[in-house]
Image (cartoon, rainbow, N blue to C red):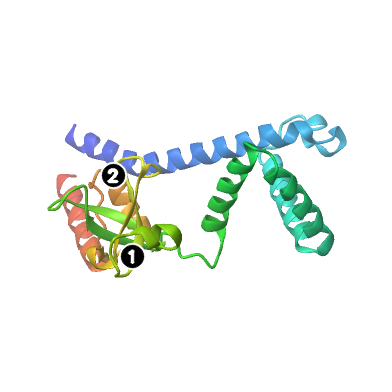
Amino acid sequence: MTRLRNYFLTGLVVAGPAGITLYLTWALVSWVDSWVKPYLPASYNPDTYLPFPVPGFGLVVGVILIMAIGFLTANIVGRTLFGYSEHMLHRMPVVRNLYRGLKQIFETVLAERGSSFQTAVLLEYPRRGLWTIGFVAGPTRGETRARLPFDEEAVTVFVPTTPNPTGGFLLFLPLRETIPLDISVEDAAKLVISFGLVSAETGEVARDRIQKAAERVLEKA
């Protein structure tokens, strides 16, 4: 029974992440297909003349359409039409605020020149003596920086919540009050999501722990 339990746990560790990843990927592909395929002409939709649906066809069409929009926007005619459409959106009272916010988020996240969330740091929060992980979004600028009551360099730090890192708190504080971590943002995010159970380690320490874990499994087997 002990050996069977070890086999089950080992299989769960291997199959669990892979199964969840495949399920989420399939759900994303199906969701995009459900949005794109209904708008395709019947002659271009393979689901209308094939005996089985083609998963992912809507996703491919969506990617091609987005690339086509980017290509058209890059030329003079496309920029003119886009500028006119954007001008019309800016004249709408409620829509303009939503559009500006979403556009700024997309530009910050997708711009290659941006350095958003490239550094994980430690900082004292929510009070002195308690430390948490934060992600540096960049130096604090504009009106916010002008109103801060100190003259030293300031940074904008996002402090995520556990286990959902999409929510959190935005802090403006002196750079000297942050301690850079020698780990990637991905490893720091894993630490936050896993309630601290998955720790970020150096390669040598990680290899030692994996080797010791494998030895214990072999001993039990």
Residue 182 shows in the view: no
Q: Which comes sooner in the sequence, label 2 or label 1?
A: 1
- Amino acid type at image mark 2: Ser
Q: Is 133 left, or right, of 116 in this rendering?
A: left
The answer to which of 182 and 76 lies nearer the viewer is 76
- Amino acid type at image mark 1: Ala
Percent coordinates x, y for residue 109 in the rendering = 52, 56
Q: In this view, does 195 lie above or below 109?
A: above
Furthest toward the bottom, the residue is: 152
Helix or strand or loop: what does disc 1 sit on?
Answer: strand
Residue under numbered circle 1: 154
Q: Which residue is drawn at 19% across and 31% down?
A: 1
Q: Residue 187: which numbered mark, if any?
A: none
Q: Which residue is drawn at 66% across and 41% down?
A: 56
Q: Callout 1: few (<14), some (14-19), or many (20+) C-alpha neighbours within 10 Å?
A: some
In the picture, residue 88 is in which quadrant?
Answer: top right
Furthest toward the left, the residue is: 129
Q: Callout 2: few (<14), some (14-19), or many (20+) C-alpha neighbours within 10 Å?
A: few
Percent coordinates x, y for residue 153 in the rendering = 32, 69
Q: In which quarter of the image is the C terminus?
A: top left
The Cα atoms of the two marked residues, 2 and 1, are separated by: 30 Å
Helix or strand or loop: what does disc 2 sit on?
Answer: loop
Q: Is 57 left, or right, of 2 in this rendering?
A: right
Residue under numbered circle 2: 194
